[in-house]
Image (cartoon, rainbow, N blue to C red):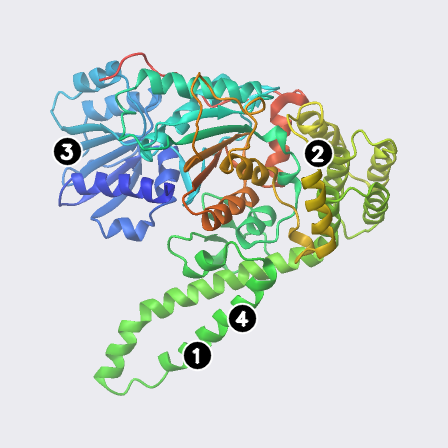
Amino acid sequence: MNVVFAVKQYVSKMIEDSGPGMKVLLMDKETTGIVSMVYTQSEILQKEVYLFERIDSQNREIMKHLKAICFLRPTKENVDYLIQELRRPKYSIYFIYFSNVISKSDVKSLAEADEQEVVAEVQEFYGDYIAVNPHLFSLNILGCCQGRNWDPAQLSRTTQGLTALLLSLKKCPMIRYQLSSEAAKRLAECVKQVITKEYELFEFRRTEVPPLLLILDRCDDAITPLLNQWTYQAMVHELLGINNNRIDLSRVPGISKDLREVVLSAENDEFYANNMYLNFAEIGSNIKNLMEDFQKKKPKEQQKLESIADMKAFVENYPQFKKMSGTVSKHVTVVGELSRLVSERNLLEVSEVEQELACQNDHSSALQNVKRLLQNPKVTEFDAARLVMLYALHYERHSSNSLPGLMMDLRNKGVSEKYRKLVSAVVEYGGKRVRGSDLFSPKDAVAITKQFLKGLKGVENVYTQHQPFLHETLDHLIKGKLKENVYPYLGPSTLRDRPQDIIVFIIGGATYEEALTVYNLNRTTPGVRIVLGGTTVHNTKSFLEEVLASGLHSRSRESSQVPSRSASRR
């Protein structure tokens, strides 16, 4: 189960099916992002695709020598654009691929518009999601719920994205959902409706153990997205922000023009692929090795070119040399900026206290440490508010709760009202009243012993002792111990065997720390394959936007209109 491979295969097949000759790839805003995650422009250029255009772009030239490959979401808006395109075609022939199920009536409208008979084929290729890592996908939806319930347009888009994922991986799953979340139950029902209605599409070869879709809600664990991260990919997202593999470095002091935006993609950056899950200390020494390796290769390239053979060798090695030079400067810049932010914001100390708030149960020590950091001028208002949020979530009902005093400390520190208000919003979003599970205190004797032993042995790394709640949930699921009264099945049937193919989806967004948990479980649990998805992939900043957007502090917002599915199929 590899989501990057699944989407990549769709794109390759589209290009192959159109045959030889020069081509244009016609996409919409969303499919442009979907394709860019799995293919670089230069890779697609090698497949005779010489032009990339947006269907909504007004001033496209007529180029009858090009074939058009259209990869579009099946929205009303896109169908209208296509109808206009087919009435006055700009290209010689059209191969149309929709990223999800298209209604019969829409296909009929397109056929009627195709008076010049330029359409060669219309197909459905279910690449309707963003493939982030091989085991991680996202729908890039920020703010999916209003209060505790779905925004209807986002429910429709999420149902489409999740059913497309199932179709692309060829899975017809049994469904379990988090009982404490109305939104999880609603999404489970919507996915089930599509599977029932489109039963022909979901007729895959039966496996001995059916796949399992587990639908969770972010509000069950509001701790994970609030923590600073120390593994490469997660840390880059937390401190710099990753948007469809792109990192904006324009604010880095003294940045050169060609490094203002860089791409970090494990598909075509070997250093990133090998280091994305390693912690920051290891990255530092690996960067040093990369630099040394580069330096060794460098003088050879600059030797005198005395013979034809020298010149030939130089020309042959130059592209690799240039690529390596780009990789080195990119990672040195990124790691350098991460180091600068860590020291400027005093993040080692901040993170240590965050981990204590997330993993230990010593109230007086935690309170003392938070108070101490709030007095530290190096600690930013963002980090100060984050510490108080973690305290508020953990010690919400503690007999000596000192939240009012900490709120006063935030005010005295000059933390803006926006962040102070978010403290109560986060507790309302993911506090004890809402959670279906207990994040902090292990119940049974075994769990208490485990925690005690963990404390005795000491943790390898004080900054990464936290395990997302998802780890425990998946561990129980794999061992057949996940309680059905907390995570019921949708419908009468239940899974008797240990699950093998598991798709987990988190409403309200997943995190890179959870993706790392899934990556490690996949590596260490033979016979089990897990894919994680979320409405988005959060860092702390986007998670707080999610909390705000949920309207737990009322705020009006526009939601992108996604049409509901039509009842018939071609």
Q: Name the kind of residue labelled 1 in the image.
A: Lys
462 vs 469, left or right, is right
- Residue named by callout 4: 288
In space, the residues marked 1 and 4 are separated at their CA atoms by 12 Å
Q: Front-most of 170 and 556?
A: 170
> Disc number at residue 154?
none
In space, the residues marked 3 and 1 are separated at their CA atoms by 51 Å
In space, the residues marked 2 and 1 are separated at their CA atoms by 57 Å
Q: Nearer the viewer, mark 2 or mark 4?
A: 2
Q: Name the kind of residue labelled 4 in the image.
A: Lys
Q: Front-most of 382 and 437?
A: 437
Mark 2 near mark 3, Cβ–Cβ under 8 Å?
A: no
Identify the mark nearer the N-term, 2 or 4.
4
Q: In terms of secondary structure, where does tag 1 sit?
A: helix
120 vs 364, left or right, is left
**Residue that appears at 33% across and 44% down:** 5
- Residue named by callout 3: 93
**x, y percent for residue 31:** 35, 35
In space, the residues marked 2 and 3 are separated at their CA atoms by 65 Å
Q: Answer yes or no: is residue 562 visible.
A: no
Identify the mark nearer the N-term, 2 or 3.
3
**x, y percent for residue 247:** 50, 49
